[in-house]
């Protein structure tokens, strides 16, 4: 099941999360499109008495400065904001200098991201004796060291 919440305001996001999940079964995890929305979700689940990550894991995309100072620290995908700006500027300059680029296919540039595993996620494995479960546990333990 997918819910789309398009509010950047942390408090409004928290209110919507509470409305959606109050009295309903929780998913294993929430994947948020931005750190502010994830922070709102964390606030909402805590207000409802849930423990993060014991009851629900939360993952986001941004890695804003505040994310590592949340309680628990937010697991997030670090985006290369500086590199994104450089790529956008180079593309724009190229389009200004070469009229043909304006009419070309969209320009796609792939930039490296980094998953910053922190305290807001926890593996919830259905069959802890499986090979995959064992590998996940070993990986998680190694990342904490």
Image (spheres, rainbow, N blue to C red):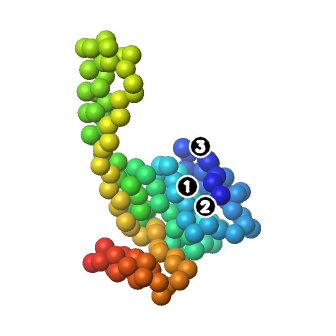
Question: In whole angstroms, how far apart are the C-alphas of marks 1 and 3?
Answer: 12 Å
Q: Is residue 33 left or right of residue 17?
A: left
**Residue 78: x, y in percent?**
35, 53
**Front residue of this view, candidates 131 and 11:** 131
Quadrant of the frame with the C terminus: bottom left
Q: Give the residue displayed 31% in from the left and 22% down from the top.
A: 92
SS assignment at label 1: helix
Which label lies toward us, 1 or 3?
3
Residues packed near mark 3 inside 10 Å, few (<14), some (14 to 19) or many (20 plus): few
**Front residue of this view, candidates 139 and 61:** 139
SS assignment at label 2: helix
Mark 3 or mark 2: whose residue is earlier in sequence: 3
Q: Which mark is residue 6?
A: 3
| Residue 70 occupies quadrant | bottom left
State the residue position of label 1: 40
State the residue position of label 2: 44
Mark 1 or mark 3: whose residue is earlier in sequence: 3
93 up-or-down from 123: above or below = above
Which label lies toward us, 3 or 2?
3
Q: Is residue 91 left or right of residue 37?
A: left
């Amino acid at each position: 099941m997918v819910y789309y919440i398009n509010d950047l305001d942390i408090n409004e996001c928290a209110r919507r999360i509470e409305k959606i999940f109050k009295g309903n079964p929780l998913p294993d995890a929430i994947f948020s499109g931005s750190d502010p929305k994830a922070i709102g979700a964390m606030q909402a689940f805590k207000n409802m008495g849930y423990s993060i990550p014991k009851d629900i894991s939360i993952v986001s995309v941004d890695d804003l400065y505040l994310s590592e100072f949340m309680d628990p620290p937010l697991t997030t995908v670090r985006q290369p904001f500086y590199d994104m700006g450089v790529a956008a500027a180079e593309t724009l300059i190229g389009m200004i200098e070469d009229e043909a680029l304006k009419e070309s296919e969209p320009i796609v540039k792939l930039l490296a991201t980094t998953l910053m595993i922190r305290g807001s996620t926890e593996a919830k494995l259905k069959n802890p004796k499986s090979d995959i479960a064992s590998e996940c546990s070993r990986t998680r333990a190694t990342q904490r060291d």
